[in-house]
Image (cartoon, grey):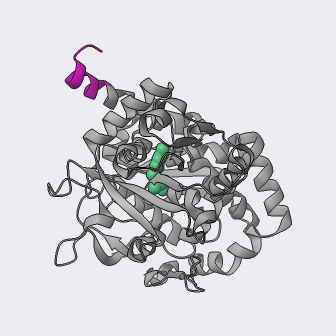
Amino acid sequence: MTSYQPNARGYYGSFGGAYIPEMLHRNIEELQANYLKIINSEAFQKEFASLLADYVGRPTPLFLARNLSEKYKARIYLKREDLCHTGAHKLNNVVGQVLLAQRLGKRHIIAETGAGQHGVATATVCALMGLRCTVFMGAKDIQRQQPNVLRMKMLGADVIAANSGSQTLKDATNEAIRYWINHPDETHYVIGSTIGPHPYPDMVARFQSVISYEIREQLLAKEGCESPNYVIACVGGGSNAAGAFYHFLSDSRVKLIGAEAAGEGIETGKTAATLTIGSEGIIHGCRTLLMQTPDGQIEEAHSVSAGLDYPGVGPLHAFLCRSQRARYYPITDAEALNAAFELSRTEGIIPALESAHALALLPKIGFEPDDIVVVNLSGRGDKDLETYRGHFLREFTCL
Ligand SMILES: *Cc1c(COP(=O)(O)O)cnc(C)c1O
């Protein structure tokens, strides 16, 4: 039987591990030595569950989407992570990591952010817990994402511009790591997805696993059976998909399907379809699949959706892909935009562009009429209205 838990050194098969500079050993070893003990303690579980319930707003509903079900001839449920506080699943992980950081005696939380969603989630929980929060963000992203920069500042966070390189996410990551190396005692670095060196991928998957835990209970109540035929989720770094798959990994009756961002198309070079075209290498501290040139330079990713615009993928998904436990399909920008409009008009729910990639798989799979299908609706679309407006102007010329 295959284990879907990483081994003691953080490997899922040949993917994972901790590839870090000497200077980070102290911080990472502290986390590796303590995370399971703390997370599994009764006191932690109690406080985590209480905040998930009353602050994040869990359990999120499992909604039977009747109009979509009729259209695609299956019983299609939406797991409503879009209804979480701050608008996406990201808060589940941040609440968990901040509680862990407190128990390690850390008073200062740092994070990096690209589009600002993870930065806002981190600033939110730090405000709640009374912790100092510093968010590193590329100078170019600060210009492009003003509403989220304002949110973070309103919540009391310091937003530090990364002025090196391309002035985007990877430069913000470099600045955050540099800061962490220089302030190891009082600082915890909150990573926003199932990526990075061990133990981050496993730790984040555990915090997000509440999604599939609830799906099982909700399906049991609604359908009399806790296993669906399909679970479908979008994959950037892979945290919402890891959470939606987690409690079904060893249940081979459940087909696990991921949607990754093809951008303008996998042959165009403007893509983020790592699992489709990537090869093995090391990115941000772990061994995984990534988009790279033949001589190992990491290639720039492209997707209309900022949350999926990443040239790597979490090591759990690299393993699930290689072992064929899960299947991953590339979805283009145009397919995702159309799926976002379809959900808005059939069910009255405006999804995040990331989540729309998962919805775009519905017409491609070919369900049996009795199939129970759960789509993880990772976030809501308020943040994407400008992109939707541009698409609408091109397609319908009347908005
Ligand atoms: C950040 C984000 C994602 C992508 O991140 P994962 O770690 O792959 O889940 C997906 N959906 C939404 C709404 C996001 O904000």
Please name the predominant secondary structure of the magenta segment in the image. Answer: helix
Q: Tell me the magenta residue range.
A: 389-399
- Residue under the point 85% across and 65% down: 42
Residue 112 is at least partly visible in this image: no
Question: Where, by quadrant of the figure, is residue 38 drawn?
Answer: bottom right
Vertical placement of residue 38 versus 129, above or below: below
Q: Is residue 100 above or below residue 95?
A: below
Q: How many marks?
A: 0
- Which is nearer the eye, 220 or 298? 220
Identified at 52% across, 55% down, the residue is 231
Q: Quadrant of the N terminus?
A: bottom right
Q: Position of residue 40 (x, y in %)?
A: 77, 70
Viewer-closest of 228 and 307: 228
Residue 244 painted magenta = no
Left or right side of 390 for 210: right
Residue 137 in picture, x, y percent from top left: 41, 50
Residue found at the very far front of the displayed protein: 369
Front-most of 247 and 164? 247
Q: Quadrant of the C terminus?
A: top left
Residue 67 is situated, as x and y percent measured from the top left of the image, at 49, 29
Q: Residue most toward the top?
A: 398
Residue 220 in view here? yes
Question: Where's residue 109, x and y in %?
Answer: 60, 57
Q: Residue at x 38, y 46 (%)?
A: 357
Question: Does residue 300 appear to the left or right of 132 in the view shown?
Answer: left
